[in-house]
Image (spheres, rainbow, N blue to C red):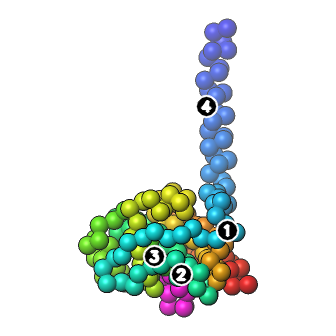
Amino acid sequence: MSRILMILPPLVFAALAAMFWLGMQRDDPDALPSTLVGRAAPVLQVGALGNHAALTHDALTAPGVKLLNFWASWCAPCRAEHPMLKQLQAEGVTILGVNYKDKPDQAEAFLAELGNPYAAIGTDSGRMALEWGVYGVPETFVIDGEGKIVLRYAGPITAQELERVIRPALTKAAE
């Protein structure tokens, strides 16, 4: 019996380590799926941020493909993804922003420092993000010209993810 008790902990550890290792090998953009994909975007309930164009629900249903990006000034990954958003803006992609759980003066300073890629901005204290299924920032939704969600992407958009995940979703949304 004591021999089994000596062998059991290392076996349990090895099994857990194998499961963790296999889980980290997943290369799945849908690792955090959304029930909203394929459905109409939920209604926006956001406040205004300074003198920026106000984000309204009509912007989500306007013709053309657009991105809805949840971001915050205190979010380091948001800062890292910002150049990709500026690049998409320069390419003509409409990007709508939701400033998440942030202080207005800090959000304004973030945009003044890095530039504003957003066609319209709203602020959210966290309540609306729950309705969208947002786990944290940054999170980006690709929305088609009818206001339907094509993709939910959790995490910062890097150059690799832009090509691998975001651009194909933009193409799909444009069809």
The quarter in which the C terminus is drawn is bottom right
Q: Nearer the viewer, residue 154 or 146?
A: 146
Real-space CA distance between mark 4 and mark 3, rounded to the nearest whole angstrom: 44 Å
The quarter in which the N terminus is drawn is top right
Q: Which residue is labeled 2 in the image?
A: 58
Q: Nearer the viewer, residue 166 or 129?
A: 129
Residue 76 at x, y percent in the picture: 39, 65
Q: Is residue 103 left or right of residue 97?
A: left
Q: Residue at x 62, y 77 (%)?
A: 147
Please identify the quarter of the rendering in which residue 167 is found.
Answer: bottom right
Q: Nearer the viewer, residue 7 or 162?
A: 162
Circle nearer the N terminus (2, 4): 4
Sort mark 1 into few (<14), some (14-19) or many (20+) by Cα contacts within 10 Å.
few
Real-space CA distance between mark 4 and mark 1, rounded to the nearest whole angstrom: 42 Å
Sort mark 2 into few (<14), some (14-19) or many (20+) by Cα contacts within 10 Å.
few
Q: Which residue is labeled 3 in the image?
A: 97
Real-space CA distance between mark 2 and mark 1, rounded to the nearest whole angstrom: 16 Å
- Number of numbered discs present? 4
Q: Nearer the viewer, residue 6 or 34?
A: 34
Q: Is residue 57 left or right of residue 23?
A: left
Which residue type carries mark 1? Answer: Arg
Q: What is the secondary structure assignment of the residue under circle 4?
A: helix
User: In the image, which residues are magenta?
Assistant: 85-95
Q: Which residue is labeled 1 in the image?
A: 39
Does 89 lie within the magenta span?
Answer: yes
